[in-house]
Amino acid sequence: MPDRRTQLLDAALAVVAEKGMKGLTHRAVDAAADVAEGTTSNYYRNRATLVEAVLDRLLELDAALLADQSPAGPPRDTEQLANQMAAMVLALAGQHAGLTRARLALSLDKPGSVTAGHFQLVGGLEQALAGLGVPDARARARDVADYGDGVLLHLLTVRRDEQPSAAAIAAAVRRLLAP
C-alpha cells in the first residue's frame, strides 16, 4: 500500500488524465483516492502546491518507467534500440495511457513542466546513439523522440481504435536511424 501522499498524487494524475487540468481540484482528488473530503487539502494547501507535487510524481514515475523498459543497460545495436522505443511507445499508449494523458494535459497547461523529462529522454537517446556510432546523434535523437511523441498522440486520439504494431514502430525508428 503506497503512503498517503503517493496515494493522493496517483489519484491526482488519474483525475488529470480523465478530466484535464480544469478537473484537478482537491475535492476531485479526495474522491478519486477514496479518502475523506479535505484530506488532499491537508497535504497540499493550495492548487499550486498540489500541481507541483503532481509534476514531481510524474517525473518519478517516468524515471521508473524508463528503468523498467531498458533494464539491461544501453542497447547493443540500433535494432535493439528500435525495439526498445517501440516497446516504450506501446507501453505509454497502452498500460500507461493514463499517465501519458496526464503528461499531455500538464504540458498543455504548463508547457515548461515536461521540459526536464523531455530533455532527459532526448539526452539518453543521444548518448545511446553516439555509443552505437550513429552519425549526428543529437539530431537523430530529436527525430526519434519527435516520432515517438507523434505516434503516442495519434494512438491516444485519432488512432485509438487501432492495434498498433511494435514491428511497424521499430521499422520507422530504424528508418530514422539509417545512414
Image (tube, grey):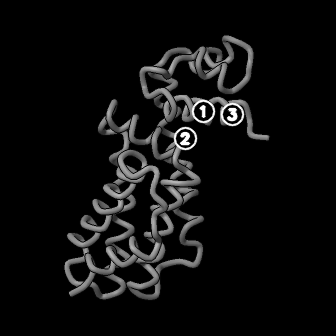
Residue located beneath label 3 in the image: 7
Residue located beneath label 1 in the image: 9
Q: Amino acid at mark 3?
A: Gln
Mark 3 residue element: helix
Q: Cα distance, mark 2 to mark 1?
A: 7 Å
Q: Cα distance, mark 1 to mark 3?
A: 6 Å
Q: Which mark is residue 78?
A: none
Locate residue 105, reporting x and y percent: 40, 35
Mark 2 residue element: helix
Above or below, 108 against 39 in this view is below
Q: Amino acid at mark 2?
A: Arg
Locate residue 155, reporting x and y percent: 41, 53
The answer to the question of whether label 2 and label 1 lie on touching residues, with beta carbons closer than 8 A, is yes
Q: As rendered, which of 175 and 67 lies closer to the eye?
A: 175
Residue drawn at (57%, 20%) of the image: 44
Locate residue 75, reporting x and y percent: 46, 81
In the figure, is residue 34 to the left or right of 58?
right
Which quadrant does the C terminus fall into?
Answer: bottom left
Above or below, 133 against 10 in this view is below
Q: As rendered, which of 21 and 93 lies closer to the eye?
A: 93
Above or below, 90 against 49 in this view is below
Residue drawn at (44%, 28%) of the image: 20
Residue located beneath label 2 in the image: 57
N-terminal label among 2 and 3? 3
Q: How many marks?
A: 3
Which quadrant does the N terminus fall into?
Answer: top right
